[in-house]
Image (cartoon, grey):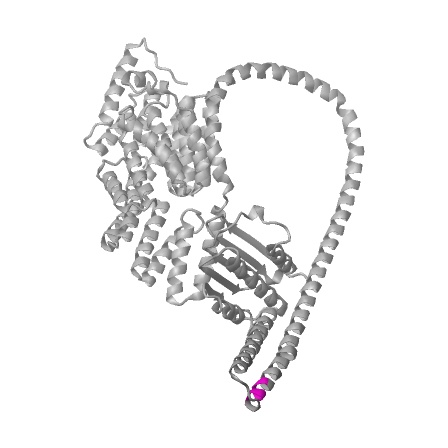
Amino acid sequence: MVHIETNSLKTMKRRELFCFIFIIAFSVNAWSNRMDSLLNLIDSQTLSLAEQIGAYHIITDSYAVSDMSNTYLYGMKGLELAKKAKNKRMIATFYRFIGSTYTYRTSYDTAHIYQQMQLEIAEELQDKKLLQQVYFTTGNIYARQGLFDKAVDNYLKSISYYSEDMREGMSLQFILKNLDKSYLYYNPVRTYLLSLGNVGECYRRLNNPERALHYLERAKDLIEKQEYLDNTCLVQVYRELGNIYYINGNIDKALEFQLKFLDLPRLNQVQESDCKEALIKIYIIKEEYEKALEYAHDCLQLAESLGDPYIDVHAWNSFANIYRAQGKYPECEEAALNAWRIDSTSIDTAPVTALNIAYANLYLGNKEKAALYFQKKAAFSEQKSNREFQETLANLEVRYETEKKEMRITSLEKEKQLHLWLSIAGAIVLLLAFGTLFYRHRLNVQKGEMADQQREMAEQQIRQLEQEKKLIATQSLLEGETTERSRLARDLHDGLGGMLSVVKLNLSGMKNYTVLNGAGINYFNTALNMVDQSIDELRRVAHHIMPESLVRYGLKTSIEDYCCAIPDARFYYFGSEERLDSQQEIILYRCVYELVNNAVKYAKATEINVQLIIDNGLVSLTVQDNGVGFDPEQVISGSGLDNIRARISVYNGKMIIYSTPGKGTEISIDIEDDCNALK
């Protein structure tokens, strides 16, 4: 650590000189000239090592966000000097600057490495301000990755380290006294407000606008009370409130807040890009496509200026959204493919990109490509559908509020740790004495463990054989059921149906050769009509027991015929026209019959969508309705859903249920043909 001797006249003059440099560096004129002046001053070798580190801090902070190459260049130079001075706080600060350059290049793994090194120093120093900044920056990395649950975790940790006494240290006298520390330009109040706003933004992206408003209102109240007036925080509050109003459908109010944001002086181009992206969505809804395209071009220019792939992806997705709204599907696909080439892995942006590509190809008639990207979009959506972390995030707030109290206990625990280490040292001596005995005992235990492992392997083989027996029994049962249904359908159609047809012919003949009075004619006609109705009902029952179209034309045609008979059902098919195994087709048809029947009979649905995808050995069946829904955890055993699971288990099929009371139901069945071990 390099200290500045306060009793030295020469050192006092240096401080006054550096104070002047500090003021000049943040004036409003000739920014590039100021940077050149600082660099020339460093080269003149008139500054102490601590002052050189401070100058590089000014330069690096000035280039942050706007120029990543210079941020990295001068950050590395400052880091080299900080390591030479063994100034751990400044080492951690330059780690933060360098890590931010990797964040904006989407090299997130490297960015996390630098944040971990910064965290280790902050924990070693037990520096609250430094810890607050570390967790805030880590939250930014996770937010850029689209991992908003982890981002909220780190932002709440950052908030927990804030206290009212951190408002000190912003005076010039304090800065001059602490030139060797990272507090030079670090404002904990600003970080606290930005953390509140960022938590609000993450909750919005997690589709939880109520929690988002809670944190945004906290930040807004502090700014309006002028307790902590910070333009950056005001910018964020306006932007996010505009986004919340957009989610709630109040487009005019959303536009008002976004335009307020755009009128404010902005500190970086990333915020400007976020605002213009929000304005694009608003103008698409208002069908003002020229304005939307204008802002999309602005976002693309900002991305190119910053060299930021994250903003680049959002810009191309904005173009795709505009062209899709205009019905320009070739242009929509081209823009979406540009976004896909830049980043096809982020769960934040990739689902939107895949959806645009799929829609464009669907309207362009490229059904196979559309189905492929619909599947990719569904895969990303599944990653984001884990609802358990929502409850975890709600509990995080309570947990991190208690961390403030726990930090006060830390100092007492350190004293206890000293006594603990002394006890451990004594225990190690005793452990060495018992080491030889333990080693011999361990040899005997290992022999027993090997026997246990062999026994477990035998039991596992037995369980596997039992499972195969169950699958064989289930398949035999299904084959018997199919055979019996086919026989019963033939008997009904050929036997009983033929007899009813003969009865109808005889009754018709009697009508021609029998003289009946008025009442007798009515009874006779009624009987004849009932015979017709019985024949129709018999045919309907025989068809549902074993549809003739299923045997002759296959699964697609039979499901399509069945859905046409249901007024509220719609059928969608994607993939090849290949026929499946006959037993597999019967099982899937019975699944459709059971699920659609449940939707009509129990869910009281007015809209039922049945989708079948057969492609490259994968069969995916989805039945979605807008009915009353149910709680999947409360479905009783032995229901029709258990019957479906038993049927598809023969083909190693999987059934996934998404349902909420009052919000409809979606049930998906996935079967991979090449996974069928009994086929």
* Span highlighted in magenta in the image: 507-511
Residue 342 falls left or right of residue 452: left
403 in magenta: no
Which one is in front, 339 or 154?
A: 154
Question: At 27% across and 20% down in the image, what residue appears?
Answer: 18
Task: Kindly report the secondary structure that dominates the magenta region of the rendered protein.
Answer: helix
Residue 539 visible in the snapshot:
yes
Instruction: From the top left corner, tell me how far across and down residue 65 is, in percent.
Output: 32, 37
Q: Residue at x 53, y 47 (%)?
A: 631
Whether 218 is drawn above or below 271: the answer is above
Name the residue located 42 percent from the left edge and 32 percent from the top edge: 155
Residue 473 lies in quadrant: bottom right
Residue 202 shows up from this direction: no
The location of residue 391, given as percent across then percent down, is 49, 37
Corner quadrant of residue 276: top left
Q: Nearer the viewer, residue 137 or 489?
A: 489
Image coordinates for residue 314, horizontal then vertical, percent: 35, 48
The residue nearer to you, when weighing 4 against 121, is: 121
Tell me if residue 476 comes above or below residue 63 in the rendering: below
